[in-house]
Image (cartoon, helix red, strand yellow):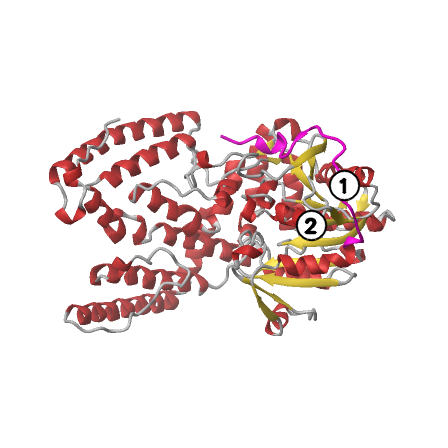
């Protein structure tokens, strides 16, 4: 590959662009372009492009267009509104050109990072930005105004319209991104050479780079809390962590993460590690490390995840510690499994095995499951099941893309601009390293989960599903409960997770943290970030709950720890780990999808 050349006297952008150096870099890009085409051809040979609309997007938009055509008055109204916006924008631009300072017609959302560079205040780029924002606003309004679509189709059309608009943002293109143009002038085009190099590497790997994957190594500077694997089976390894205090609470603590991702979301770098913090508070901590399944696990069911997961873990913990009761924290899908576990234990007379239950961003009522429900209709499920039948699992990259699409500007387009237009290397970030560490889903389990919960919402119905031979009824659960949801959660919307407060029979504490599905949960007290709301009253309406909730700055972790002390028992001498199959974090978590 041709490499750019830059001498010291050409390094200062104030000297202007060096045309000779710029031409050299453009020539280098030409060579890179040929390499990129070759890589794309190789990739298409490995996996031929399917003409089938696997997500059935086309059918949804055809329904929308037919409804639009049936209402020409609405089409005319949208067009006139848009023309009026464009006329106002022309007047605004003219006013700026003659030296006036009119108020913008539209401003990006305060959390929108795309237009934060000061150069977007330049009159030309300001006009481009506002043209895009006004057009996007009117397109979104037009979709919302369409009548006659069923709710699922309307959400689907709205979601993919937003994906389309996000992709067309002027920030994503070199000639309409002032920051990228400035970088091109300052580096004489070297940013584009580096960007093409990054693009070729990402095409080769089959993913957009979000962080420096070489900056972290599981077991060394991430997932590095001291502990031992004390048990394993086909689906999980159970890790017990080394105590950090002379005395510990009598009741051990089990973390049950989702198997959609790796467990070390609980154990990032030391300063962000929930596990490290829990051990420092005097808890005896165990965690389930799920296997990254392959074709050997195709017949593993939800029953198996219950029996070989938390049920098996409870047996080992009781035998290891002598405690007949354990507190459990379930995260996301791990929390959904926790609710099923508690209903199973109640039905079989074993409810005292769990002292308290903590649910982190957990759905039990899937009637309003957020944007993920867009991917769950009969046509898409049948297509997914066909793909899983050939491999025995759902590929982890498919799962990762789905989740990234829910926050496309932050998890897709931000990195397109950073990596390819600005030519920067991704910043080393432990959370994004974890996010890039994808996992597969066993075919049988995943089909049951999507159909029974996302599609049919059977979990909230008494006896709606049967797991491990037990009809599940969440209303029977009397275990003391702490529920933590997050205000900006795009995976488990908090107004939906709140519904469980009206479902369980035992005492329930509901807390709402600021930020999203991950950042709102993994928020150590030392960072002094975000806040949380609490309200001991649990009215039927989540809006009413929030209106009367009290606000506290900082992390929810100490609040939870204070609540947990009521179920933690007395302090006893710290437990030594008596058995070890291998050092934490174990080999299950280290299997990475390339």
Vertical relation: 446 (above or below) 357: above
In the rendered image, residue 592 lying in the magenta stretch gets the answer: yes
Left or right of 251 in this view: 242: left
Q: Residues within 10 Å of mark 1 (few under 14, many from 20)?
A: some
Residue at the far right in the pictured view: 349
Give the overall secondary structure of the magenta segment: loop
**Percent x, y of residue 55:** 49, 44
User: Which residue is painted at 47% across and 46% down in the image?
Assistant: 404
Q: Quadrant of residue 22?
A: top left
**For the residue labelled by badge 1, is the local secondary structure a helix, a strand or a loop?**
loop
**Percent x, y of residue 180:** 26, 48
As drawn, the label of residue 227 is none
User: In the rendered image, which residue does mark 1 sit on?
Assistant: 575
Left or right of 47 in this view: 535: right
User: In the rendered image, which residue does mark 2 sit on?
Assistant: 329
Q: Residues within 10 Å of mark 2 (few under 14, many from 20)?
A: many
User: Which residue is painted at 44% across and 28% down in the image?
Assistant: 47
Residue nearest the observer in this picture, 132 or 263: 263
Looking at the image, is mark 2 or mark 1 earlier in the sequence?
2
**Percent x, y of residue 84:** 28, 70
Q: Quadrant of residue 162?
A: bottom left
Instruction: Look at the numbered discs 2 and 1 and tell me whether their residues touch, using CB distance below 8 Å.
Output: no
Residue nearest the observer in this picture, 208 or 267: 267
In the rendered image, residue 316 lying in the magenta stretch gets the answer: no
């Amino acid at each position: 590959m041709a490499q750019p050349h830059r001498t010291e006297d050409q390094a200062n952008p104030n000297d202007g662009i060096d045309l000779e150096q710029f031409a050299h870099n453009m020539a280098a890009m030409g060579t890179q372009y040929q390499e990129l085409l070759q890589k794309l051809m190789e990739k298409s040979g490995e996996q031929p492009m399917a003409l089938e609309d696997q997500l059935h997007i086309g059918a949804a938009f055809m329904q929308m267009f037919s409804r639009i055509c049936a209402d020409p008055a609405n089409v005319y109204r949208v067009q006139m509104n848009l023309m009026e916006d464009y006329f106002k924008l022309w007047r605004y631009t003219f006013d700026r050109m003659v030296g006036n300072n009119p108020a913008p017609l539209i401003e990006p959302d305060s959390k929108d990072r795309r237009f934060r560079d000061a150069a977007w205040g330049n009159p030309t780029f300001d006009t481009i930005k506002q043209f895009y924002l006004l057009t996007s606003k009117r397109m979104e309004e037009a979709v919302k105004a369409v009548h006659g679509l069923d709710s699922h189709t309307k959400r689907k059309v709205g979601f993919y319209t937003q994906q389309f608009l996000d992709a067309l943002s002027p920030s994503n293109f070199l000639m309409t991104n002032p920051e990228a143009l400035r970088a091109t002038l300052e580096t004489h085009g070297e940013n584009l050479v580096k960007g093409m190099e990054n693009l070729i590497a990402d095409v080769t790997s089959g993913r957009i780079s979000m962080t420096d994957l070489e900056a972290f190594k599981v077991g060394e500077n991430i997932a590095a809390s001291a502990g031992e694997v004390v048990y394993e089976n086909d689906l999980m390894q159970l890790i017990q962590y080394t105590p950090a205090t002379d005395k510990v609470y009598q009741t051990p603590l089990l973390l049950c993460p989702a198997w959609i991702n790796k467990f070390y979301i609980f154990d990032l770098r030391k300063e962000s590690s929930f596990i490290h913090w829990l051990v420092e508070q005097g808890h005896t901590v165990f965690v389930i490390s799920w296997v990254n399944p392959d074709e050997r696990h195709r017949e593993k069911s939800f029953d198996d995840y219950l029996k070989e997961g938390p049920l098996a873990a409870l047996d080992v913990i009781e035998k290891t510690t002598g405690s007949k009761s354990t507190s459990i924290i379930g995260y996301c899908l791990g929390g959904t499994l926790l609710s099923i576990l508690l209903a199973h234990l109640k039905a079989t007379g074993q409810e005292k095995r769990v002292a308290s239950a903590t649910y982190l961003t957990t759905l039990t009522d899937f009637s309003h499951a957020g944007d993920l429900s867009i991917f769950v209709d009969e046509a898409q499920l049948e297509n997914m099941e066909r793909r899983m039948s050939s491999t025995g699992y759902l590929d982890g990259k498919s799962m990762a893309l789905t989740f990234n699409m829910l926050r496309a500007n932050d998890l897709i387009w931000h990195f397109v601009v950073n990596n390819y237009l600005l030519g920067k290397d991704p910043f080393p970030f432990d959370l994004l390293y974890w996010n890039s560490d994808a996992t597969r889903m066993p075919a049988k389990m995943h089909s049951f989960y999507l159909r029974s919960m996302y599609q049919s919402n059977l979990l909230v119905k008494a006896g709606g599903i049967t797991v491990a031979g037990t009809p599940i009824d969440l209303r029977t659960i009397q275990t003391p409960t702490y529920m933590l949801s997050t205000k900006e959660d795009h995976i488990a919307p908090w107004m939906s997770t709140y519904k469980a407060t009206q479902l369980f029979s035992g005492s329930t504490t509901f807390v709402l943290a600021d930020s999203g599905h991950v950042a709102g949960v993994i928020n150590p007290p030392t960072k002094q970030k975000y806040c949380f709301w609490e309200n001991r009253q649990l009215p039927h309406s989540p809006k009413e709950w929030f209106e009367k909730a009290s606000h506290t700055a900082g992390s929810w972790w100490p609040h939870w720890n204070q609540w947990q002390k009521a179920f933690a028992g007395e302090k006893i001498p710290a437990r030594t780990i008596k058995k070890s199959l291998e050092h934490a974090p174990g080999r299950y978590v280290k299997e990475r999808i390339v």
